[in-house]
Every structure is written in structure tokens, then in C-alpha cells.
Amino acid sequence: MPRNIRRGLVTLFCLVSLPLFGQKEENTLSLSLEECIQKTVKNNLGLAVEVLTPEIADLSVALANEKFMPVLSFNYNKQDTRSASYSFLDAEETVATLQNDYSSQVSQLFPTGGNLLVSLTGYLIDTNRRAQTINPRYGNTLRLTFSQPLLKDFGFKMTRREIIIAHNGRDISEQNFAKIMADTIYSVESAYWNFVYSIENLNVRRQSLKLAQELLEKNRAEIEAGTLAPIEILTAQADVATREADILEAEAMVKNNEDLLKTIINLPAEVENAEDVRLIPSDKPSVIKKNISLEEALRAAMQNRPDLQATRIDKKNKELNLSYARNQLFPDLRFQASYWSPGISGDRVLFEGGNALTGKVIGKIPGKSSDALKDVLDFKYKNWSVGLTLSFPLNNLLSRAFYAQAKLNLEQANLRIRNQEQQIFLEVKTSVRAVLTNYQRVEAYRAARELAQKKLEAEEEKFKVGLSTNYFILQYQRDLANAQVMELRAIVDYNISLAYLNRVQGTGSKRQTSGGFKGKEAAASQF
């Protein structure tokens, strides 16, 4: 930094430093800009609300992934039926049947859209019907069934559509949180530098009042000595009253900006009786010139802007929806294949003469229910089938409307991105120009402040030898105070414009998270 600028800053920010409201030091809290940002990330209620959104999106992803989890189901049914017998071949009076059915199955969805079903079913039938060669009878069947769509609903994207959209939704929530983080950081920086400006503005106003009061006291002494006409004191008294009013306005500005900063960092979350604590900013705004290229700033914005990234991710969802809608126009052609193994066992009933129609039971050969299961697992009886099923609606008006809607949504997303890119270009161009302009303002107002200081010193020398009047002294004092305030405003505006440039480039939150804390993690740690 050039020596004359550094000397001017020392004069501007140190020479005029005075106690703000005369509060005791135990009621003050000194904070740097970095500390304010960290407290905001930790305590700000708005961030606390938004930090939950990505976590909710993570749960949506986990929920969508359950689609590919195997599904296990069990079924058991027992029934005891009785009915009248209408034939001596059936039963004598009442037909009684006891039947138990049970099954278990596992189904698994594949990324291609296919589905595999493995089931094991069994039953027990015990009846008083005549001519039963096996009674009670046990049966089991092991079946493997695979179904694969070949047109409609075929493919990895179609099957994983909900999961992809859930992942994109999580990414969008992350980008939205990054945007809110960047906006919050910018609001902290803006509030902090405006608070600094209001304090230094008050100090300048107090210094100006002090100069006017000294001139007023000097005028009174000269009037008493008879070297100055009494009417000359009126100009000094009017100026003192005006500068006292300026101080009241400056004090209100300090309190307003302090309250705003306290609210943003949520100071009551850490400090009891936060209303009684006076904040003291420990950082001073710098005027280090930064060489900024519009092309580089625009390139950074296109790569880092979280709102633009969120819109681009949303476009991917629209593309996926269009692909899905196009797929739903196809007919439903499915390949199906089955393989099953049955097994039967039970008590074998022996009839006289080997004829069940005689109805005379001469004995039984006991059977085990496990024998049927053993035949099933040994694949004693092998069966299989394959086939194709084709189905299509006679009118697919709704599917075509869904496809047309998806096309319009994608076109709308493309237009939204183009419009957003234009807005970003305008914001970046404006912010780069603001940085350059504000730096030039600092230089210009610094020169104006130095000239105002020299003019006041020269006029005071003339006043000492009677070549000037109160009016000109007071006027030059006001000019100096205004020049100091304008230089302060330009310096603060320059720092705020740098913060805004970081925001429009999408690098504000990254710049802060690289300083030693993680944005979302820090916010979540408090809540």
C-alpha cells in the first residue's frame, strides 16, 4: 500500500477514535469479521433451518434405494370345511376336509427391470372322502420365476429413475444450502463493514463537534476581551447545534447497525443479556487494489454459482423424465421363464383287491411330510416353461400427453438456464465494475480529504492573523468532516463490493470454509 494512503488511513481511523458511549469494558465484545462469520454459521437460525434440508434429502435417497432390497413374505392359512354328502362314493353323511396352506417367497428387482421370484409352497389335506389313495396328503413346490420387460420399463435408467431423481434432489438441496450460506456470509460482511462505517462516522462527527466547540470557546474569550463583535458568536453557536444533531443521527445509525449484526450472528445464543453488550469490530477495511478480469470472474461464476448448478441438476431430472415418458409409449413386451419342482407324500391307503372303489381299507403305509420336501429339494420332478407376453393400450392418449409435457418441461429448463446465465453475466459485470469504481472513489476521496485538511489548516493560519472569519473556518471544518465521511463510505463500499463479487462468483462460501471450518457441519454442530 502506498505510504500516503497508509498515512491517510492511520489519520482517518485512529486519530479520530473516541469512546463510543462510555460503557465499561466488561460490557464490550471485540469481534473480527472472521469471528462474526463463524458465529453466524454456528448460531444463525435461518441456517439451522436450511441445514436440515440436505439431511432430509439423504433420507429420500435411502428410501428410494430400498426399491432394490429383497422382499421376504410368509403366508399361512388353515381351513376346516364340512358339507353334505350327495354320493356314497364321496362320504356317508358329511364331507369333512382339513387343509393347511403355507408359503414363503423372496422377490428381487434387478436394475434391468427384471424380477426374480423364489417361492416355496406347501399344503396338508386330511379328508374323510372315500377312494383317497393318499390321506392325509402333504405337498410342496419350489418355484423360480423370472420376468424381464423388453420394451416398456426396460433399462437401468427406467428402473433406477426414482433413485437418480432422489440423488439429484439431494445435490440440489446441497447447492441451495451453499447459496443460502453464501448469501448469509455476504449479509454478515455487509453488516460488519456498515457497522464499522457507522462507528467511524460517529467519531468523525464528534471530532468535528470538538473543533466547533473549541472555536466557540475561543470566540467567547475574544468577545470578553473586546477583540470580537458579539454577533460573530452566533455562527459558531449555530454550527455547534447542527453538529450535535449530526451526532444524534450518527449514534442512532451505530445502534441500528449493531442490532442488525447482533441479529445476524444470533448473539443471544452465546451471550446472556446480549442487549447490554456493545460490539467492537476489530478489523479495519482495506484498500488493497485487486486486479479483476471480467472473463475470469464470469468463468468462476459459471463454474461455482450454486443456484446455476442447482438449475443444471434440475435439467438432468427433466431429461430423465423425458426419457421415461418416451419409454412409456412402447408396448409392454415381457419375457417370462419358470422352473419348478413339486413333491407329494403322505399315508398311503391300501384297499381290498387294490381297488379304491370297494371302499374297504385293509391297511396304511405311513408317510412323512418331510418326504415331499425332500423330493422338492432333490429336484426329483423337473418342470420348466418360457413365454412372451405382449400388451398395449388401444389408446395411449395419456402417455402421449405425459411425453409432450416432459418435452415442454425440458425446453422450459433450457430457457431457464439461458436466462439465469444472462442474469449472472449482468451481475458479474456490474460487480466487477463496482469494485473498480469504488477503488477509484477511494483514491479520489482520499485526495479530496487531504486537500480539505490543507485548506482548513491554511484558513486557520489566516484566521490567526485576522484575515478570515468564523464562517469560513466552520465551512472548511464541515468540508473536512464531509470529506472524511465520504472517504470512509468509499472504503467500506469497496470492501462490500469485493464481498458481493465473491457472492456473485459463487466463491463466498468456499472462501470462508477454506478458512478453518466447514459450513454445513459447523451449522449442524450447534443445532
Image (tube, helix red, strand yellow):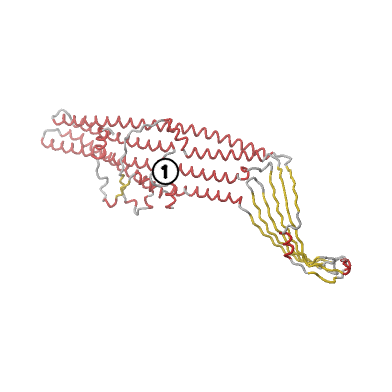
Query: At which x and y percent is residue 292?
Result: 38, 32
Q: Residue at x 23, y 36 (%)?
A: 239
Which is nearer the eye, 435 or 62? 62
Amino acid type shown at disc 1:
Thr
In screen coordinates, is 172 left or right of 260?
A: right
Q: Nearer the viewer, residue 366 or 123?
A: 366
Out of 381 and 141, give the one closest to the viewer.
381
Left or right: 86 as drawn, with respect to 158: right
Q: Residue at x 35, y 53 (%)?
A: 271
Callout 1: helix, strand or loop? helix
Q: Quadrant of residue 201?
A: top left
Q: Position of residue 81 (x, y in %)?
A: 78, 65
Asked if residue 242 shows in the view, the reply is no
Q: Outermost residue toward the top?
A: 467
- Residue 78 position, x and y percent, is 72, 64
The residue that disc 1 covers is 184
Residue at the far bottom: name it.
362
